């Protein structure tokens, strides 16, 4: 009989993560990592993918269980693993959390894949079949040529198929303090051959595509040429897709890139503006934003919108340089710059980042009862002591941003402007829905987080904001 592999994408019911997934439920596409792993699995295995926000992982029988997780659902991943292990079923975990903390993960699973699955998954299956499963597999980064085709047939039944996901590149040469991507995928920007990406796009039924890249435009001249080639060839091959991707802030520098991206169906891009404070950008080591300069942010947004592409901007709060006026300044910027969608999140020290190490060293982490407390590391909860405000004030400040920029009327006004400026009605509708969705997600969870936070703060007995002495220590640790 065929051996059975269950691949699980876990969801924490109690966390925001759950709501965030429910919000995206209508998109109903599993993580592509699981589809890649399914494709790497020998054909004589029977493979099934379970996304927990669609169906519970109800301990159906399997020979081997593979689990993926970012940090916040890691406690749920461990819980699922232990349930299977109690039944005598072996489990394997991979993904960013397990890759950053393999020694933690191995306490809950039988085997951990550190890094990328492609170079090691077939060996792992072979070892499993021979009863020789190892505790760790190190997935070195390989070329992205001839990647297997993700097993999309395994999620044919997923609901509406309005969107599909494709990855064209991995890795990032930058070194932002808060980010673990270069540690996971390396500091070399690796690209898939353009024609292989196009062949994959051609097989998709959905008209809308999210490119999963951290920056589809890439880094440097060669990457820029490749991006233009990709966009031109999408048009030439008549793929007729509408797409959305993350890009770096210098996407706006080259009018050819904007023109070809639009012609290839780009309707929206996401840029991490992060902050309106250049000192913070320096602290984060967000080099490319610094090079463009905060004073030019509005111009960047305008240039992109002039090409018919809407802009989603992300901003992060709770940085050491943020004083309480940061929220009002950001509200003014959002409304004044006419940015189509703005997402404000709370600075989060994910494991494996320099930010995590620094805050730990400074004794500023609030929630450290790991692995259970990882559930709070979701970008929506303050998990450390900010420097110039209390965690409550931080939550309330971000709350004000959403209140002032995503109310029904404001969202409509902003969407109207988006549609006019980009000459793109679809973009206007998406901008309106996007703002409403992000705003309601935040507001819906605000009270819940605030209550749980209050008890954490009360129980910790720590002072807020941090004391003068701690502040000096932090400055010297950062070499200022
Ligand atoms: C696209 C994306 C999303 C999409 C996901 C859409 C989807 N359904 O796939 C959306 C927008 C929904 C999203 C949401 C979130 N995201 Co996100 N996302 C990404 C992004 C840009 C790419 C992920 C991706 O698909 N990569 C492509 C695949 C092929 O790579 P991969 O997942 O790493 O998988 C490879 C290996 O890791 C390994 N592997 C992975 N899983 C497994 C499992 C097994 C068994 C094995 C053997 C191997 C293995 O093999 C794979 C192939 O080589 C990453 C950044 C990045 N580059 O990783 C951030 C990233 C993963 N996201 C992040 C965060 C924080 C979130 C949110 C919590 C944000 C929020 N508050 O809403 C949510 C969490 C949702 C959830 N429950 O997981 C952080 C995670 C940090 C952390 N330590 O937790 C990242 C790293 C961004 C960052 N710079 O910090 N995200
Ligand atoms: S935030 Fe973006 S640019 Fe910075 S290291 Fe991460 S992926 Fe690279």
Image: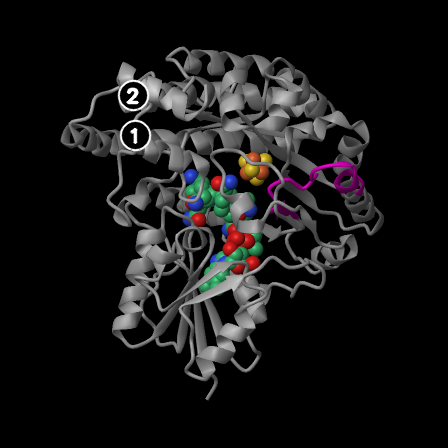
Badge 1, how many Cα within 10 Å: few under 14, some, many 20+? some
On whether residue 209 falls in the magenta region, the answer is: yes
Apparent side of residue 2 relative to residue 273 in the rendered image (left or right): left
2 or 1: mark nearer the eye: 2
Q: Measuring 48% from the left and 85% from the top, which residue is drawn there?
A: 2
How many badges with numbers are in the image? 2
Do residues under tags 2 and 1 come within 8 Å of each other at their CB atoms?
yes
Q: Measuring 28% from the left and 14% from the top, which residue is drawn there?
A: 468
* Callout 1 secondary element: loop
Residue 334 horizontal/vertical position (percent):
53, 18
Which of 253 and 368 lies nearest the eye of the viewer? 368
The colour style of the image is one colour
Extent of the magenta region: 208-225
Apparent side of residue 229 relative to residue 111 in the rendered image (left or right): right
Among numbered discs 2 and 1, the one appearing first in the sequence? 1
Asked whether mark 2 lies closer than 8 Å to ligand 1, one says: no
* Callout 2 secondary element: helix
As drawn, the label of residue 316 is none
Residue 325 horizontal/vertical position (percent):
40, 10
Badge 2, how many Cα within 10 Å: few under 14, some, many 20+? some
Q: Hey, which residue is sitting farthest right in the picture? A: 236
Identify the residue under disc 1.
364
Q: Measuring 33% from the left and 33% from the top, which residue is drawn there?
A: 361
Above or below residue 204? Residue 419 is above
On whether residue 65 falls in the magenta region, the answer is: no
Apparent side of residue 103 relative to residue 115 in the rendered image (left or right): left
As drawn, the label of residue 470 is 2
């Amino acid at each position: 009989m065929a051996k059975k592999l269950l691949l699980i994408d876990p969801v924490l019911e109690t966390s925001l993560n759950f709501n965030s997934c429910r919000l995206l439920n209508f998109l109903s596409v599993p993580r592509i990592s699981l589809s890649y792993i399914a494709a790497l699995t020998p054909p004589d295995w029977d493979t099934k993918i379970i996304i927990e926000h669609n169906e519970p992982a109800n301990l159906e029988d399997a020979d081997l269980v593979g689990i993926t997780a970012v940090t916040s659902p890691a406690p749920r991943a461990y819980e699922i693993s232990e349930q299977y292990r109690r039944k005598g079923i072996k489990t394997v975990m991979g993904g960013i959390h397990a890759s950053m903390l393999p020694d933690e993960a191995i306490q809950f699973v039988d085997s951990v894949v550190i890094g990328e699955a492609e170079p090691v998954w077939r060996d792992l299956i072979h070892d499993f079949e021979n009863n020789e499963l190892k505790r760790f597999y190190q997935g070195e980064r390989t070329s992205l040529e001839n990647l297997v085709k993700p097993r999309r047939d395994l999620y044919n039944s997923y609901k509406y198929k309005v969107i599909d996901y494709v990855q064209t590149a991995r890795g990032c040469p930058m070194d932002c303090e808060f980010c673990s991507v270069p540690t996971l995928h390396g500091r070399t920007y690796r690209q898939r051959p353009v024609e292989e990406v196009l062949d994959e796009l051609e097989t998709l039924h959905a008209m809308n595509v999210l490119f999963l890249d951290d920056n589809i435009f890439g880094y440097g001249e060669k990457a820029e040429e490749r991006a233009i080639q990709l966009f031109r060839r999408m048009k030439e091959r008549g793929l007729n897709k509408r797409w959305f991707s993350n890009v770096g802030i210098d996407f706006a520098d080259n009018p050819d890139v904007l023109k070809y991206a639009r012609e290839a169906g780009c309707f929206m891009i996401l840029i991490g503006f992060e902050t309106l404070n250049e000192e913070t950008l320096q602290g984060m080591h967000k080099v490319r934003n610094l090079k463009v300069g905060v004073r030019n942010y509005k111009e960047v947004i305008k240039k992109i919108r002039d090409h018919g592409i809407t802009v989603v901007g992300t901003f992060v709060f709770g940085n050491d340089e943020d004083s309480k006026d940061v929220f009002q300044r950001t509200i003014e910027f959002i409304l004044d710059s006419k940015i189509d969608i703005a997402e404000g999140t709370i600075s989060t020290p994910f494991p494996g980042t320099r930010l995590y190490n620094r805050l730990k060293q400074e004794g500023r982490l609030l929630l450290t009862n790991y692995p259970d407390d990882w559930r709070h590391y979701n970008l929506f909860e303050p998990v450390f002591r900010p420097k110039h405000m209390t965690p409550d004030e931080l939550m309330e400040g971000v709350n004000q941003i959403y209140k002032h920029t995503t109310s029904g009327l404001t969202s409509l006004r902003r969407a109207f402007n988006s549609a006019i400026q980009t000459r793109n009605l679809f973009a206007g509708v998406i901008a309106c829905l996007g703002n409403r969705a992000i705003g309601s997600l935040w507001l819906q969870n605000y009270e819940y987080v605030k209550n749980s936070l209050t008890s954490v703060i009360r129980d910790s007995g720590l002072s807020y904001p941090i004391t003068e002495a701690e502040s000096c220590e932090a400055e010297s640790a950062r070499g200022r």
